[in-house]
Image: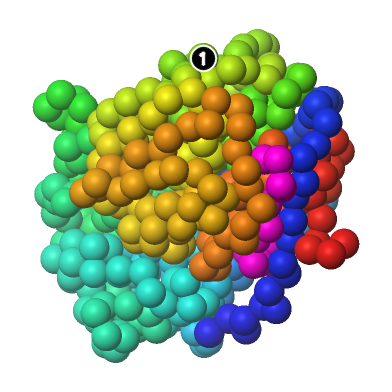
Amino acid sequence: MSAHSTPVPSASRPSGPLQGAVRVPGDKSMSHRALIFGLLSVGETHVTGLLEGDDVLATAAAARALGADVVRTGEGAWTVRGVGVGGLASPAETLDFGNAGTGSRLMMGVVAGHPVTATFDGDASLRKRPMRRIIDPLLKMGARVVAEAEGGRCPLTLEGARETVPVVYETPVASAQIKSAVLLAGLNAPGRTTVIEREASRDHTERMLRHFGATVEVEPWGEHGRKITLTGQPELAGSDIAIPADPSSAAFPLVAALIVPGSGITLEGVMMNPLRTGLFTTLREMGADIEAINQTSEGGEDVATLRVRASALKGVDVPAERAPSMIDEYPVLAVAAAFAEGETRMRGLSELRVKESDRLAAIADGLTAAGVVNRIEGDDLIVTGGAGRVRGGGVAATHLDHRIAMSFLVLGLAASEGMRIDDAAMIATSFPAFTPLMRSLGADIAMDGG
Ligand code: S3P
């Protein structure tokens, strides 16, 4: 299991107007997938804009352990020489995914479809996360669990199928990780593998499958869902892929600019896949001044530059159906809601309980520490905003969760007493340059006491 990093207590203080233009790092979901598809392709894959955060580096190491040649050729530039679908080797060592739920779960799908055996492990946060939701469909496809920790958790040893069985699988919750694990296993199955989801989740796997040469059919399913069918055993060909800036990382400077009076910032090259932009929709409903300019496409995804200005926000009701398109953004939305006028109700957040931490509890506790009135009703979070005035001054417990850490540092930039967090170390999993980037915009963030 990963060594426990030493906690880095950090603090943010009320800051003057944030100003400047920045590009946040590459999208995490696409970065994991680019390396995985590189592994499963024949020939060379050239990736630019790769997120060089700990989560993605763990996936790069796992791709190497499974037989790929993975080389860094420059900043964010990586070359992967793959083994092709069917060509995986059993890794000699445990695959240590650190904090990375996505990397571990997607790679479980890859391993499940191949006649190899691998052990998956990670840090204390990953060891708490449920893996049965991934393993259940993979067992139907012919994989076997050789060993697992209590409750179907890591460390977990998975023996892949000798002959992978194509399945039709309806995901029990809207989850791109479950969908992707099944599709990745289905790559090495003869025939067609189908995943049905009642609420559409992010579709980077489907887009990248096509980009690397697989045949994928996507049909609408019910009101908000999709039916995705992959034809197995394609020959995937190494490809070039440019990864746009991660909208989930852009969310932090964006909300900071909205709540720090007088701010005006520009966020360059942000991915605008409609299955990822629920936060922008919600913030605009709250009255946020966010302008999308220079709309283009990069790596098969829509991309835009966002101009953001400080705004007087008002509370809104966020429908449960929107959750899949902003599932990682609720911590920072809750911060925006703390500064809005009136109540914001965020509905249908049960999935937040099984993220890097129990995010529902971590958000509520952090808000309480900051003096923000909030309550949880069933799976809903209700935040009573202070109409621009938040006391702050407490310490948010981050529970090895990067997004909780960044969200409460953002809160402190506009709270009268600032805010402290117990540990900023996990920010390196998704946004290693968070602190210098925020400081370059004028944010007062430093190690506690620094
Ligand atoms: C991801 C899917 C989401 C998200 C995670 C990244 C992905 O998880 O929370 O950060 O890249 O597929 P779920 O699929 O469990 O909702």
Q: Is residue 50 left or right of residue 29?
A: right
Q: Is residue 132 left or right of residue 345?
A: left
Q: Nearer the viewer, residue 343 or 409?
A: 343
Quarter of the image where one finds residue 217: top left
Q: Position of residue 125 (x, y in %)?
A: 47, 72
Q: For the magenta stretch, what is the residue range?
A: 415-426
Q: Is residue 309 magenta?
A: no
Q: Quadrant of the C terminus?
A: bottom right
Q: Is residue 27 above or below residue 22?
A: below
Q: Position of residue 24 (x, y in %)?
A: 70, 38
Q: Is residue 92 above or below residue 195?
A: below
Number of labels in the image equals 1
- Please give the name of the residue rendered at 33% of the width and 58% of the height, measured from the top-left corner: 353
Q: Position of residue 198 (x, y in %)?
A: 17, 37
Name which residue type carries label 1.
Gly
Q: Nearer the viewer, residue 167 or 94?
A: 94
The reply to whether the residue tagged 1 has its Cβ within 8 angstroms of ligand 1 is: no
